[in-house]
Image (cartoon, helix red, strand yellow):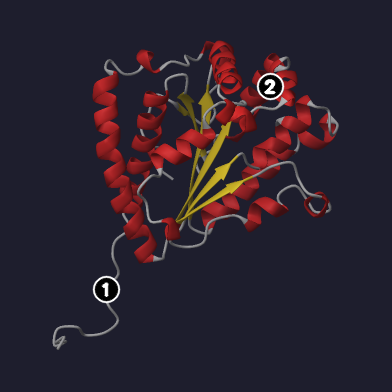
């Protein structure tokens, strides 16, 4: 599948250094005002493409979002997909696996949520948790999680071969930005529900998570399922960059309205 030209693309076979990658949008766009205006235009185009994709019922698009806690996954979904036809977009949030899910292989719950034809599927967290959390938290030994890179690549190839375009975004925030967002949640009673004491424990494991993300991104950015690392300290740039990539992806997919199965030329509404 063709790659969307973006400074945030991890080219297959290249070596990505997560700690050397900028997290602020000012490094990539000269004007916040212009980026916000361009984002609004791109989102309108996204809405039109999504409508055609849903009408055509031939192709499907899977959008994967991964990030550290407070990385902006929920905000991205809310901002980027505002205005789309809700019938044609399905968001799946992958929490801690249930007892039933744990009784199957780690991809069982993921495959069930893959988008059908005409749909955009959005994964808020994903199958990558099984090479991230399970690694850092020592839930399973390395002999179990390390082979999963190859398993994931085969799984994504299966989806791609079945007509699914896959675009994966890692929302890259700095440790300082995460601190500010956590503090905002503590300061705002309306956001207390979004804060967990476990977030602080995971924050102490920041370096371990960076290592795990770096390995996952390097091992699993393939021609059929590319990873994009989005500077996400700046929400305005995050929204612009992701929407631009999605619009360019849909332009390449080029869905169109189907022809009517009936001859409508002589139809008269009385």
Residue found at x 84% / y 53%:
103
Residue found at x 36% / y 52%:
253
- Sequence order check: which comes first, mark 2 or mark 1? 2
Image x and y of residue 105, in percent = 78, 51
Residue 124 visible in the shown view: yes
Image x and y of residue 85, in percent = 38, 56
Q: CA gap, disc 2 to disc 1?
A: 49 Å
Secondary element at tag 2: helix
Residue 10, placed above or below residue 52:
above
Image x and y of residue 260, in percent = 27, 77
Between residue 81 and residue 212, name the one nearer to us.
Answer: 81
Residue 266, placed above or below residue 229:
below
> Could you say which disc has been placed on residue 209 in the image?
2
Mark 1, Cα crowd under 10 Å, few <14 / some 14-19 / many 20+, is: few
Q: Quadrant of the C terminus?
A: bottom left
Q: Which residue is mark 1?
A: 259
Residue found at x 58% / y 16%:
183
Q: Quadrant of the N terminus?
A: top left
Residue 33 falls in which quadrant of the image? top left
């Amino acid at each position: 599948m063709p790659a969307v030209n973006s400074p945030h693309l991890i080219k297959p076979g290249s070596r990505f250094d997560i700690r050397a990658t900028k997290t602020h949008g000012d490094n990539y766009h000269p004007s916040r005002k212009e980026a916000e205006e361009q984002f609004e235009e791109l989102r309108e185009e996204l809405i039109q493409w999504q409508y055609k994709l849903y009408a055509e019922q031939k192709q499907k698009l899977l959008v994967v979002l991964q990030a550290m806690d407070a990385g902006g996954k929920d905000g991205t979904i809310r901002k980027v997909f505002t205005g789309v036809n809700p019938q044609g977009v399905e968001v799946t949030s992958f929490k801690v696996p249930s007892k039933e899910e744990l009784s199957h292989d780690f991809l069982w719950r993921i495959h069930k949520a893959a988008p059908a034809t005409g749909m955009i599927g959005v994964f808020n967290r994903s199958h990558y948790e099984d090479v991230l959390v399970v690694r850092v938290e020592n839930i399973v030994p390395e002999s179990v999680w390390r082979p999963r890179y190859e398993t994931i690549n085969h799984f994504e190839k299966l989806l791609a071969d079945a007509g699914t375009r896959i675009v994966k975004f890692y929302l890259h925030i700095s440790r300082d930005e995460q601190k500010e967002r956590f503090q905002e949640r503590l300061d705002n009673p309306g956001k207390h529900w979004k804060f967990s004491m476990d977030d602080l424990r995971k924050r102490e494991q920041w370096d371990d998570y960076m290592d795990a993300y770096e390995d996952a991104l390097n091992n699993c950015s393939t021609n059929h399922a590319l990873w994009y690392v989005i500077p996400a300290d700046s929400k305005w740039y995050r929204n612009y960059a992701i929407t631009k990539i999605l619009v360019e992806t849909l332009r390449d997919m080029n869905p169109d309205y189907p022809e009517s199965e009936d001859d409508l030329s002589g139809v008269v509404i009385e």
